[in-house]
Image (cartoon, rainbow, N blue to C red):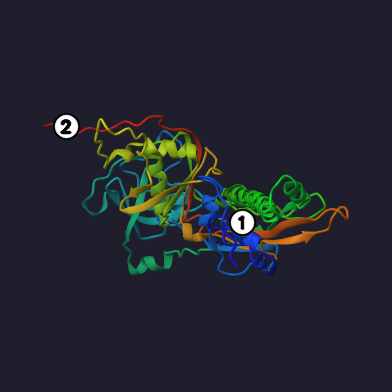
């Protein structure tokens, strides 16, 4: 039997399956708009979680593209005639080797050598292949557009060795107690036995559903090592930002203030360098900012009708980025300071083997009391961190009203 909080497909055991009240209540759960949307969209894990501690494996992916210079400096990183000691960021030199052809603002250069200690490169010449040599400022992006080497270069070409990174997460046990003593009180006030059971069970199941919803996004991981700690599972936000003791890279974009169309496009550009996300998750507040961005107006027609008294209706459900269509989805447990751009298939949830969500009888505190509990141990997994997802941080506001574009009559 499937127990569903909307699309929640957990909570299956012999007791629950045999209880028509639990089955009926499962179909009645209504968490309200934008509650539990993220949890419901999570996919099941591929392999059963069989221990309280489990590892999420990933592979690094060194980008061939990057930016030049010392980030934040106002001085020019490259003069138009320098061929040695050209400044690069530490991240940029990681993916470069002898023979790479770089395109920077239309100028082509061929890498002669890479100094990973000083984060610099030497090039064969400036303005290769008939392009024009020019000065380039710090933080100017470059792209590797090819390889041009000779037989004698081969011995100096370095390979790029990707590494396996490990993110250790934990299963988190949840309990929700149902006090069946209240059942008798409800019956005494005119409810039938079945109505009273449905009411108490439904209320408990809603509380569990709301708990799972916020854990999936805001959970922080912890290992139980003493009587003062408990196992807790990292949710979406921590998994997208935790570098796991320096062995794992993450993708983040610091908005540093108001969310704008340019910043959203920059974050999308960054993640599309390595992945192919399909979903944007945000809070109701951030969704209003997105609705007011100029991208909302590109294909909008407004038809005024004196008999039309319907308000609203102008909102964004999807964003088109260079032909890739991303769904914009809302969950109230997303903080107003963040926006997550994710590949949904890589985000999963699972229950610990033999400890799935069940309803059990609990020891009573007295002979006149009957207590039950909903309990289980759940874990969350985000695969492809550092490649397939990016978290926008530092959002403090956004457009408060929509600016409509009008076409010229000419």
Q: Residues within 10 Å of mark 1 (few under 14, many from 20)?
A: many
Residue 154 in view here: yes
**Residue 144 in picture, x, y percent from top left:** 35, 56
Q: Which one is nearer the viewer's eye here, 366 or 134?
A: 366
Residue 149 position, x and y percent, is 33, 64
Q: Is residue 78 above or below residue 109?
A: above
Which is more toward the observer, 69 or 191?
191
Query: Is 93 situated left or right of 319 in this image?
Result: right
Q: Quadrant of the C terminus?
A: top left
The quadrant holding residue 4 is bottom right
> Circle 1 is placed at which residue position?
25
Q: Earlier in the sequence, mark 2 or mark 1?
A: 1
In the rendered view, does 303 fall on the left or right side of 392? left
Residue for badge 2: 408
Q: Secondary structure at mark 1?
A: helix
The answer to whether residue 138 is visible is: no
Q: Is residue 247 depicted above or below 126 in this figure?
A: below
Judging depth in this view, the residue of 356 and 237 nearest the camera is: 356
Mark 2 neighbour class, 10 Å CA radius: few under 14, some 14 to 19, many 20 or more? few
Residue at image location 67% in from the left, 56% down from the top:
194
């Amino acid at each position: 039997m499937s127990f569903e909080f909307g699309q929640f497909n957990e909570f299956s055991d012999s007791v629950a399956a045999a209880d028509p009240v639990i089955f009926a209540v499962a179909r009645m759960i209504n968490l309200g708009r934008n509650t539990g949307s993220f949890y419901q969209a999570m996919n099941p894990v591929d392999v059963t979680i069989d221990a309280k501690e489990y590892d999420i494996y990933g592979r690094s992916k060194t980008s061939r593209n990057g930016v030049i210079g010392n980030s934040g400096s106002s001085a020019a990183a490259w003069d138009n005639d320098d061929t040695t000691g050209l400044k690069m960021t530490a991240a940029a030199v990681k993916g470069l080797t002898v023979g790479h052809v770089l395109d920077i603002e239309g100028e082509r250069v061929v890498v002669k050598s890479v100094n990973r200690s000083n984060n610099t490169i030497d090039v064969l010449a400036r303005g290769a292949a008939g392009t024009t040599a020019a000065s380039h400022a710090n933080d100017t992006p470059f792209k590797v557009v090819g390889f041009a080497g000779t037989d004698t270069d081969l011995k100096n070409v370095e390979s790029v060795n990707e590494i396996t990174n490990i993110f250790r997460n934990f299963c988190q046990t949840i309990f929700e107690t149902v006090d069946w003593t209240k059942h008798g009180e409800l019956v005494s006030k005119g409810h039938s036995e079945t109505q009273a059971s449905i009411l108490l069970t439904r209320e408990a199941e809603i509380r569990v559903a709301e708990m799972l919803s916020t854990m999936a996004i805001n959970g922080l991981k912890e290992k139980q090592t003493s009587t003062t700690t408990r196992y807790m599972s990292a949710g979406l936000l921590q998994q997208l930002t935790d570098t796991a003791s320096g062995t794992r890279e993450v993708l983040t974009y610091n908005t540093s203030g108001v969310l704008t169309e340019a910043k959203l496009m920059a974050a999308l550009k960054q993640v599309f360098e390595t992945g192919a996300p399909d979903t944007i998750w945000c809070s109701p507040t951030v969704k209003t900012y997105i609705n007011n961005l100029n991208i909302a107006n590109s294909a909008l027609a407004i038809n005024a009708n004196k008999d039309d008294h319907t308000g609203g209706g102008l909102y964004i459900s999807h964003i088109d980025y260079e032909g890739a269509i991303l769904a914009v989805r809302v969950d109230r447990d997303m903080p107003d300071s963040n926006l997550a751009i994710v590949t949904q298939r890589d985000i999963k949830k699972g229950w610990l083997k033999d400890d799935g969500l069940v309803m059990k009888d609990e020891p009573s505190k007295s002979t006149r009391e009957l207590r039950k509990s909903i309990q289980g141990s759940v874990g969350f997994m985000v695969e492809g961190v550092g490649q397939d997802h990016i978290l926008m941080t530092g959002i403090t506001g956004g457009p408060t009203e929509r600016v409509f574009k009008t076409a010229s009559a000419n």
